[in-house]
Amino acid sequence: MDTLDAPNKQAIADFLGRNPNFFNEYPTLLADLHIPHPHGTHAVSMSERQLIALRDKVRTLESKLAELIQFGEENDGISEKLHALTLDLVAAGTLQDLAGTLALHLREGFAVPHHAMHLLADGGLAPDAVTAIATLLQPVCGPLVVPQASDWFGEVSPHLKSFACIPLRMAAGSPSLGLLVLASEEEKRFYAGMGTLYLTRLGQTLAAALTRMQA
């Protein structure tokens, strides 16, 4: 079997690229060409190889479409749950009602096993914790960005491995009312780089409900 070095292979590829009518001028050559099957050991014709490549491309596109549909359905589900939480928070008459409503939805709607919320107005925070909470502009997932928050989870704290720290702000430029922390024993439940759109909306919704109660 004849072999070609890389420069000669590239020269042939360049020639065919510059001469798309080459196989029209030599149709028998195209019919006689056989190349390795991409998923086996036997050889197939050029036309069969093109058909196989097309089928593989279709399968890849179908897989990507299925993923997009799945993500869309998951996002729709999250939106519905967040909407239901918003309606119940609006109906909450006291801070105790709000805390109970939040706990119920996080546990049953979002399957978040642990959470803790602390308002800056309640005090009891170290100066560095106050600064961290007051300057946190958007949710951060992964390790705790406010170390003192680990104390809020009591005896379960040593078992928690991932967190979502959510500032309670009605908007990015508005003052922070406090911090909501979601926690899990699963290391990959909340991870750095994950999407935080719905976490941001959750923080804004809680901030709006708290502001209404304080008015």
Image: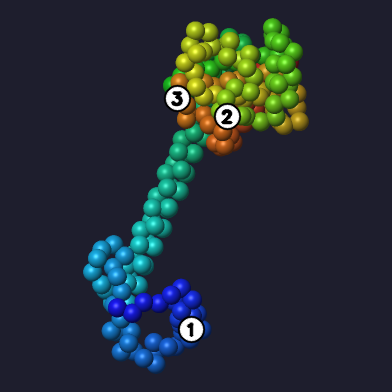
Residue with the mark numbered 2: 141
At x 75%, y 27%, the residue is 174
Q: Nearer the viewer, mark 2 or mark 1?
A: 1
- Secondary element under disc 3, as helix, strand or loop, is loop
Q: Secondary structure at mark 1?
A: helix
Q: Is residue 13 visible?
A: no
* Residue picked out by circle 1: 15
Q: What is the distance, in whole Å, between disc 3 and disc 2 at their CAs?
A: 13 Å
Question: Is 62 drawn above or below residue 82 in the view shown?
Answer: below
Residue 202 seen in this snapshot: yes
Q: Tag 2: Cα neighbours inside 10 Å, few (<14), some, or many (≥20)?
A: many
Taking the spot 70% from the left edge, 16% from the top edge, the residue there is: 129
| Quarter that holds the C terminus | top right
Of residues 141 and 205, the one nearer the viewer is 141
Which one is earlier in the sequence, the residue at label 2 or at label 1?
1
- The percent coordinates of residue 13 (x first, y second) are 46, 78
Residue at image location 57% in from the left, 25% down from the top: 143
Q: Quadrant of residue 22?
A: bottom left
Mark 3, residue position: 186
| Residue 30 quadrant | bottom left
Is 41 on the left-hand or right-hand side of 172?
left
Rendered location of residue 80, percent (x, y) = 49, 33
On screen, residue 35 versus residue 74, left or right, reads left
**Residue shown at 39% from the left, 57% from the top:** 60
